[in-house]
Amino acid sequence: MPDTPHISHNRTGFRLSLQYSFLYTILVTLIFVVAFLLSQHELREWAHEWMWDDAESFVQMAERDGSDALIASIEALGRINLTYDRIYALVDADGVVIAGNAKVVNITPLRSFYPIEAFGVEPADPEETTGYWVQSIPINGYTIIQGTSDHVIYELLEALRTSLILGVLAFIAVGLYLGTRVGKLTGDRIAAISDTLDMAGQGDLSSRVPAGEGPKDDLERVGRKINDTLERIERLVDVQKQITTDIAHDLRSPLQRLRQRLEKIDPDTDFDMQRDASLDAIDEIVETFQSLLRIAELERGRLLEDHGETDVGKVLATVLEIYEDTAFEAGQTLVTGQLDAGLPAIPGNANLLAQMFANLIENAITHCPGGSTITVSAVAVGSGLRVTIADNGPGIPLAERERVFDRFYRSDPSRYRKGNGLGLSLAKAISTAHGGDLSLANVDTGACFVWVWPADLMATS
């Protein structure tokens, strides 16, 4: 029983989650730093726009009411701003401050920011005020100097900085939590896949990756693929086990008969008769092994390495001619249904295709009673073709139709009917090797085998 998975720094999911969290932290921090710098810039622009709005009011006042009104207005503003968050100074042509709350104005050369010493003032909060953003405009022979202390911006930026830091910490905490959570979930699912593969490697092919757990992502698709693969492997192993059992069962009877006949041979018996019967039993065993070997070689594609174009119409006509007498001797009728002229030639082995059709016809002859009719048809379908071998015999029970192509499968459970149960399996292997599809059609009466080439015609038929 595999151990319950735990978060470990050695697990891929956990390492990926930490990397994700680290990158997420860097990204969020960078975003907040850029946001802070942009906010700082916008606040400074806001301060300048604020001063420009006041400057426009001063210009309009001077044009409307004259210089005396301008001097009175600036003097009043200076008295109001006792904390020196904002400074105003009206300077004459000699640089003397006529009105405002600035004691001196030493702003040569003109810049955008000056320390508090340039104006000779003492702000209410000197620890948070280091200077002023300044602008000047000439008006009526005077110069208006306006300044906004960085204390105003400092208060706003401090609140913004605090909010941003708290936001960064909150986002980092959420990112770490989500990253760890995702890492744990991913790690648990990877561990479940690993445990399933480990159990399968130890021989437990019934183990499966838990389905329906977690999101529908790549890991879920990998889990489904693994489960599908394990199911196919389990079926193949079951088939191999059944084949082994069937081989043992099929070979036991002829070997026992061979042993019994050999034991009976003595000078007083008909030696030739016993020898022929023994040889027949040996031939039956050899035929079984040859059929198994041929199926295996077909499944590996070894029998079709060198092949040319085969006229299916001619192959089918030859097989029908051979089996007409066989069907007649069995009291049956082998007839040709629709047989299109000019059936397409396909790449393949004529002998193997002939054996496929022969096996299908032999199967019908073997399992149909006297008086039955076996009909063979071949029609062109586009650039492909469809061949059907149908009979009006007893048919195949619905519950057994899925097994007719299994090795050693026989509808007669007693196994006394002649044959080794490999005819249809070999026909299926030949069909697949040629790129065709051999199937059993659902019909109400008798049995109907359908072979289409190429195989993708089955999807449209």
Image (cartoon, grey):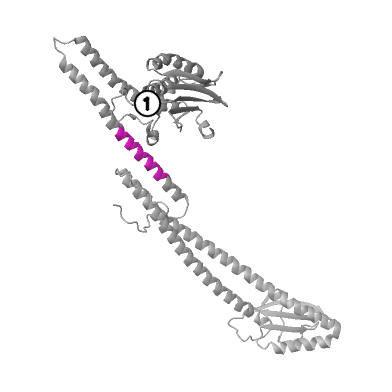
Q: Can residue 98 be seen by looking at this rendering?
A: no
Q: As displayed, is residue 359 above or below residue 63?
A: above
The amino acid type, in three-letter code, at marker 1 is: Ile
Q: Residue furthest front?
A: 371
Left or right, 198 with respect to 26, comes to left
Q: Can residue 304 be seen by looking at this rendering?
A: yes
Magenta highlight on residue 312: no
Q: As displayed, is residue 78 above or below residue 250?
A: below
Rendering coords of residue 130 (x, y %)? 62, 79
Q: Quadrant of residue 120?
A: bottom right
Q: Residue at x 44, y 18 (%)?
A: 334
Magenta highlight on residue 241: yes
Q: Predominant secondary structure in magenta?
A: helix
Q: As displayed, is residue 433 above or below residue 22?
A: above
- 441 or 204: which is nearer to us? 441
Q: Secondary structure at mark 1?
A: helix
> How many dots with numbers?
1
Rendering coords of residue 22 (x, y %)? 47, 60
Q: Which residues are magenta?
A: 225-242
Q: Residue at x 78, y 87 (%)?
A: 73
Rendering coords of residue 277 (x, y %)? 24, 15
Left or right, 226 with respect to 58, comes to left
**Can you identify the residue that label 1 sits on?**
295
- 23 or 284: which is nearer to us? 284
